[in-house]
Image (cartoon, coloured by chain):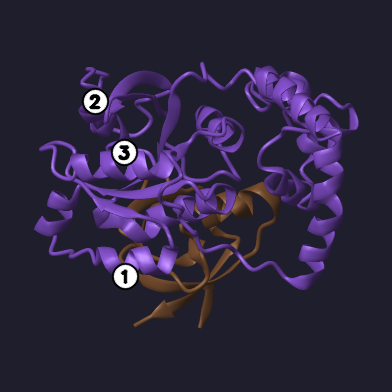
Amino acid sequence: MFWKKLKSKTENFVQVEIIPSRKNKIVALAGNPNTGKSTIFNRLTGLKQHTGNWPGKTVTRAEGEFEINDEVYTLIDLPGTYSLLSTSEDEEIARDFVLFGNPDTTVIVCDASVLERNLNLAFQIMQITNRCILCINLIDEAKRKGIEIDKDVIEKELGIPVVLTNARSGEGIESLKEKIFLVSNRILKPNPRKIEHKKEIKDKLNQLIPLIDKAFPGLYSTEWIALRLLQGDEKIRKAIENGNLLELINKGLFNGNEEFRN
Amino acid sequence: MTKKLSELKKGEKAVIVNVNLNGLTRRRLYDLGFIPGTIIQVAFESPLGDPVAYFIKDTLIALRRNESENIDVELIN
């Protein structure tokens, strides 16, 4: 019985093609536009992915490899996004990967000088995955503006590891690697602060989630899907009704699929 | 005094009181930082007065009138 369940899980796992080859551990770089994700990507991989000081530069996801302690990791550089809830088309790649790609670690990159603004996305990602790290980048610029970041307080408030970096100079990259290693290998288990839903919502979620799990075994982020249903998201409702939710996630659930747009 | 965000003049500062929109537009505005309690200031107006750029949470964001007229604000002196 248990074996059967496990098997069906793996089958679905393979089905979801947005997961790249699983021989390596997968690390995703997510964050608001123009926070320096690509600079961090280049620092970690030694590649020369084009960087630029304007938002929306990375429109498709870039992949590279890097090593920590002789272990190879695949790093995915995602396009910048403000949110997992209301996205424009180019942001959907990022959202779909964070939601359904099940990376071993998600590094949330923030701009130190506009931290408050950036924490919106950080918080949303923390609701989906426990295995995340907050990377507060551009600390040199923040320092110049007179902003001081209290890493320990943020770590305590959010419940996830925080690393301060200046990717341009390489400052903090080693400690970012260390945190990626610890989280990916489940040595360090972050305990992100979660939203306490109201009782009415909680009750509905408790009804919906098992149903979704049953209909689509192996699917990640079922709570997110359930919340979308409660919000009246037509695309998700249709996809569940037609039973082709997994298929659609494969194709990119929200990527220009006319039938499910609007 | 409560006003519509669209009624603010250049340079005026206010606190957002309410976002009278629903669904995705509301969600999007929240994601961009238009949350009740946030301080907002009119930064630039385009020649025809629409859209208008606002300083909000350390960033400049432009809104069209059909969005800004649905946001209630309280003027700060």
A256 shown above or below B6: above
Residue A95: x and y, percent? 55, 36
Q: Secondary structure at mark 1?
A: helix
Q: Above or below — where is B28 with respect to A40?
A: below
Left or right of residue B26: residue A163: left
Is A210 situated left or right of B74 in this image? right
**Residues at marks 1 and 3, CA–CA distance in whole angstroms:** 25 Å
Q: Amino acid at mark 1?
A: Val
- Residue B17: horizontal and vertical position, in percent? 54, 74
Q: Are marks 2 and 3 in contact (CB under 8 Å)?
A: no
Residue at x 54% of width, y 57% of height:
B30
Q: Chain of mark 1?
A: A
Mark 1 and mark 2 lie on one chain; the one further toward the N terminus is: 2
The secondary element bearing badge 2 is classed as: helix
Alpha carbon of mark 1 to alpha carbon of mark 2: how far? 29 Å
Q: Residue at x 61, y 53 (%)?
A: B27
Rendered location of residue A246, percent (x, y): 75, 25
Q: Report which quarter residue A233 is drawn in.
A: top right
Q: Which residue is mark 1?
A: A153
Per the model, the C-alpha gap separating discs 2 and 3 is 15 Å
Of callouts 2 and 3, which one flags the residue occurring earlier in the amino acid sequence? 3
Kindly identify the residue that appears in the image at 62 percent across and 49 percent down: B25
Q: Is residue A35 visible?
A: yes
List the residue tagged with mark 2. A42
Dot 2 alpha-carbon crowd within 10 angstroms: few under 14, some 14 to 19, many 20 or more: some
Is there one chain holding both mark 1 and mark 3? yes
Chain identifier, purple in the render? A
Disc number for residue A34: 3
- Tell whether label 2 touches label 1 (CB within 8 Å): no
Q: Quadrant of residue A10?
A: top right
Three-letter amino acid code at disc 3? Asn
